[in-house]
Image: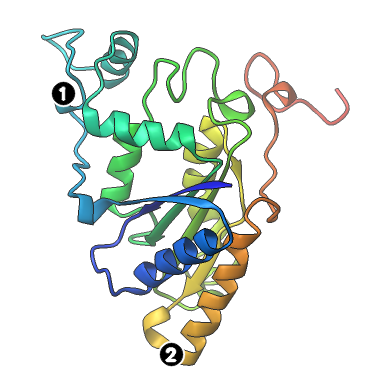
């Protein structure tokens, strides 16, 4: 299996850093291939603008999707975007490794998605989306740390269900582009637990990444389940 880890944490000694090292070492030792994009270490530019392209479609008005489609058709994507797209094409499974900040992705990782998930049929567009997306057949998983304790992130918890918080990432980014979405791996409040508990979490994570190809997934409706208005058809119709 070929695994691409996109790591988004500014501190190498963080628990996120430990998770990425654990995953990379475990997968490599088991004979899998691993590529890591450590976005902070790379100095990845998360700002999406005309610097995404070496081509110009409309010099007077910037519309990102139009510029993306034109760049895809004319080999005009910036080198750093092409490099990340090559890794996505290469992998069988994608892991997004990050801390949950303000109920979402860190800006560095969100910017990676904004810049790399280009339209024009390269990542989506032209009828390529959801279960018919470009990355259909590949798996993707979010591995993340969360500042608060687990009971806070439930239906009756103060922060609400973690599944709801992660829905824009799972459904709107990963499933939208065709990935089969693996259930997330969560570690709550790693700075508030003992070294022994952190070691237990890393051992659990080691087992998860080694079974990434068979780990439980989140099931979403298929495009065929919707009518022409993109409304879910009643069951059996």
User: In the rendering, at what x and y percent does residue 120 appear?
Assistant: 40, 15
Q: Earlier in the sequence, mark 1 or mark 2?
A: 1
Helix, strand or loop under label 2: helix
Residue count near mark 2 (Cα–Cα under 10 Å), binned few <14, some 14–19, many ≥20: few
Residue count near mark 1 (Cα–Cα under 10 Å), binned few <14, some 14–19, many ≥20: some
Helix, strand or loop under label 1: helix
Q: Which residue is mark 2?
A: 195
Q: In this rendering, does residue 175 appear at all?
A: yes
70 relative to 128, above or below: above
Q: Which residue is at a point 47% across and 23% down the rendered structure image?
A: 124
Q: Which residue is mark 1?
A: 50
In the image, 78: left or right of 197?
left
184 relative to 226, above or below: below
User: In the rendering, at what x and y percent does residue 194 appear?
Assistant: 44, 92
Cα separation, mark 1 vs mark 2, equals 46 Å
Quarter of the rendering containing residue 110: top left
In the image, 71: left or right of 152?
left
Q: Which residue is at a point 32% across and 48% down the rendered structure image?
A: 109
User: In the rendering, at what x and y percent does residue 230 appear?
Assistant: 63, 21
In the image, 14: left or right of 35?
left
Q: Which residue is at a point 84% across and 31% down the rendered structure image?
A: 235
């Amino acid at each position: 299996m070929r695994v691409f880890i996109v790591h988004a944490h500014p501190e190498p000694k963080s628990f996120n850093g430990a998770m990425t090292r654990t995953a990379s070492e475990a997968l490599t030792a088991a004979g899998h291939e691993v590529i890591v994009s450590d976005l902070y270490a790379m100095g990845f530019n998360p700002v999406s603008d005309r610097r995404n392209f070496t081509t110009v479609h409309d010099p007077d008005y910037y519309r990102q999707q139009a510029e993306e489609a034109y760049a895809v058709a004319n080999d005009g994507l910036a080198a750093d975007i092409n490099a990340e797209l090559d890794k996505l094409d290469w992998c069988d499974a994608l892991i997004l490794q990050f801390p949950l900040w303000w109920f979402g992705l860190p800006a560095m990782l969100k910017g990676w998605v904004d810049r790399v998930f280009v339209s024009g049929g390269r990542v989506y567009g032209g009828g390529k989306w959801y279960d018919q997306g470009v990355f259909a057949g590949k798996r993707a998983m979010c591995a993340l740390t969360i500042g608060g304790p687990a009971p806070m992130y439930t239906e009756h918890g103060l922060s609400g269900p973690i599944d709801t918080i992660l829905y824009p990432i799972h459904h709107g980014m990963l499933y939208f582009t065709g990935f089969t979405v693996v259930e997330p791996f969560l570690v709550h409040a790693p700075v508030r637990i003992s070294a022994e508990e952190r070691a237990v979490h890393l051992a659990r994570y080691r087992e998860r990444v080694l079974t990434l190809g068979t780990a439980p997934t989140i099931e979403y409706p298929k495009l065929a389940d919707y009518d022409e208005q993109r409304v879910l058809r009643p069951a059996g119709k």
